[in-house]
C-alpha cells in the first residue's frame, strides 16, 4: 500500500473514494464483497500488464481517451458497481502508474472495511489486524513465508486459511488473503499495520466539516446529515462554517476525505485541466 504522498495522487484518491462510497450506497454485503474482488482483480491485471498500466495512468493523454480504453477492455468484465470506480480512477491524474495500482487496491480494501463498518464489526476487524501484525512480525519463519513475492499464492492462502478461518471476522480473513497474495515488496506485518491504520481512520470519520457560502436551512442540514449518514453508515455531526470564498455549493470534509461540490472547486479543477 503506497502512502500516495504526491498531491496529484491524493486528489485522485479522494475523487475515486467518493465514487466508491457512492457505489457501496445501498449495497448488500455480498455485493460489496464482489465489488472489492473486482477492484483487486483490476489492480492485479494492471500490476501484471505494464503497457496497459502506463496507458491508463498517462496524465499527458485526454482523460476521456483513458476512460474509453478502460471501458473497452473492462466493461463486460466488471459489475455495475465496480466499473464507475475504475473509470473514475483512470480519469483521475495520478503521479505515476504505480499509484494508480495502489489506489485501486486501496479502494478494494476500503470497500471491505465499509462492509465491516455497516455490520458494526469494524472495531473487531481493526483489533484483529493489529494483533495479527504483531503475531506474524514476531514469527520470523512465518513472516518470511507469507511475505515471499516468489511464493506460491495458493500455498500462502492455504496457510492463512489454516491459521485464521473461523477465528477472525470474514473481512479480516479477506484482507489478509489479499495482502499475502500481493505483498508488493513489503513485509506482511507492515501491511497488516497499515490495514489496521486504514480501519482506524474509518472509525474517526464521524464529523463532517461543511463550508458554505450561505447559511443552510434546518431542512437542508437534515437532508445533508441523512445523506452522509447513509454513505458512511453512522451518525454524522455537522460542523458548519460560512465561507464566501466557496462561491456556491458546499465543501465537505469527513476525516481526510474531501467532497468538493463548490463552484470554486469546480473552477479550480477546470483550471488544472486547461493547464495540462
Image (cartoon, rainbow, N blue to C red):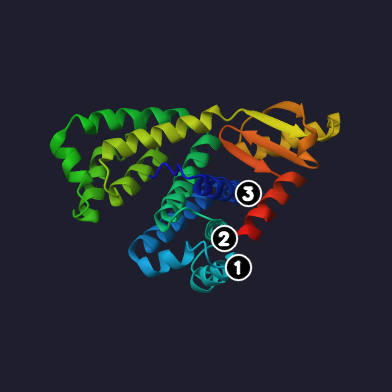
Across the whole image, how many numbered discs are drawn on residues?
Answer: 3
Q: Position of residue 79 (x, y in %)?
A: 54, 62
Residue 193, label in figure: none
- Does 167 sit left or right of 119 as displayed? left
Nearest to viewer (mark 3 / mark 1): 1
Residue 42 visible in the snapshot? yes
The outermost residue toward the bottom is 72
- Residue 236, quarter of the rendered image: top right
- Is 193 rendered above or below residue 110? above
Q: CA distance from mark 3 to mark 1?
A: 21 Å
Please name the residue that numbered disc 1 is placed on.
64
Rendered residue at 34%/29% (across/down): 130
- Is 216 rendered above or below residue 266? above
- Does 3 sit left or right of 212 as displayed? left
Q: Position of residue 229 (x, y in %)?
A: 67, 35
> Nearer the N terminus, badge 3 or badge 2?
3
- Does 29 sit left or right of 242 as displayed? left
- Is 3 rendered above or below residue 91? above
Please name the residue that numbered disc 2 is placed on.
91
Callout 1 secondary element: helix
Q: Are the residues tagged 2 and 1 within 8 Å (C-beta)?
A: yes
Residue 22, label in figure: 3
Amino acid at each position: 500500500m503506497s502512502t500516495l504522498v504526491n498531491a496529484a495522487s491524493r486528489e485522485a484518491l479522494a475523487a475515486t473514494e467518493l465514487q466508491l462510497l457512492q457505489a457501496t450506497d445501498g449495497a448488500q454485503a455480498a455485493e460489496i464483497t464482489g465489488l472489492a474482488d473486482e477492484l483487486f482483480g483490476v489492480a492485479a491485471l494492471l500490476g501484471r500488464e505494464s503497457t496497459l498500466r502506463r496507458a491508463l495512468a498517462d496524465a499527458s493523454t485526454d482523460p476521456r481517451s483513458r476512460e474509453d480504453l478502460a471501458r473497452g477492455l473492462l466493461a463486460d468484465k466488471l459489475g455495475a458497481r465496480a466499473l464507475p470506480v475504475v473509470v473514475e480512477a483512470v480519469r483521475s491524474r495520478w503521479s505515476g502508474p504505480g499509484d494508480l495500482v495502489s489506489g485501486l487496491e486501496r479502494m478494494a480494501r476500503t470497500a471491505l472495511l465499509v462492509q465491516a463498518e455497516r455490520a458494526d464489526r469494524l472495531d473487531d476487524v481493526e483489533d484483529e489486524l493489529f494483533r495479527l501484525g504483531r503475531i506474524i512480525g514476531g514469527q520470523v519463519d512465518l513472516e518470511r513465508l507469507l511475505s515471499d513475492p516468489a511464493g506460491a499464492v495458493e500455498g500462502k492462502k492455504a496457510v492463512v486459511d489454516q491459521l485464521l478461518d473461523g477465528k477472525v471476522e470474514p473481512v479480516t480473513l479477506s484482507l489478509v488473503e489479499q495482502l499475502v497474495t500481493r505483498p508488493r515488496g513489503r513485509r506482511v506485518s507492515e501491511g497488516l499495520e497499515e490495514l489496521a491504520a486504514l480501519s482506524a481512520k474509518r472509525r474517526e470519520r464521524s464529523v463532517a466539516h461543511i463550508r458554505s457560502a450561505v447559511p443552510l436551512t434546518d431542512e437542508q442540514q437534515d437532508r445533508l446529515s441523512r445523506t452522509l449518514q447513509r454513505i458512511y453508515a453512522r451518525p454524522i455531526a455537522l460542523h458548519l462554517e460560512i465561507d464566501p470564498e466557496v462561491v456556491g455549493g458546499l465543501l465537505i470534509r469527513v476525516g481526510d476525505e474531501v467532497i468538493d461540490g463548490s463552484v470554486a472547486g469546480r473552477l479550480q479543477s477546470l483550471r488544472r485541466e486547461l493547464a495540462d
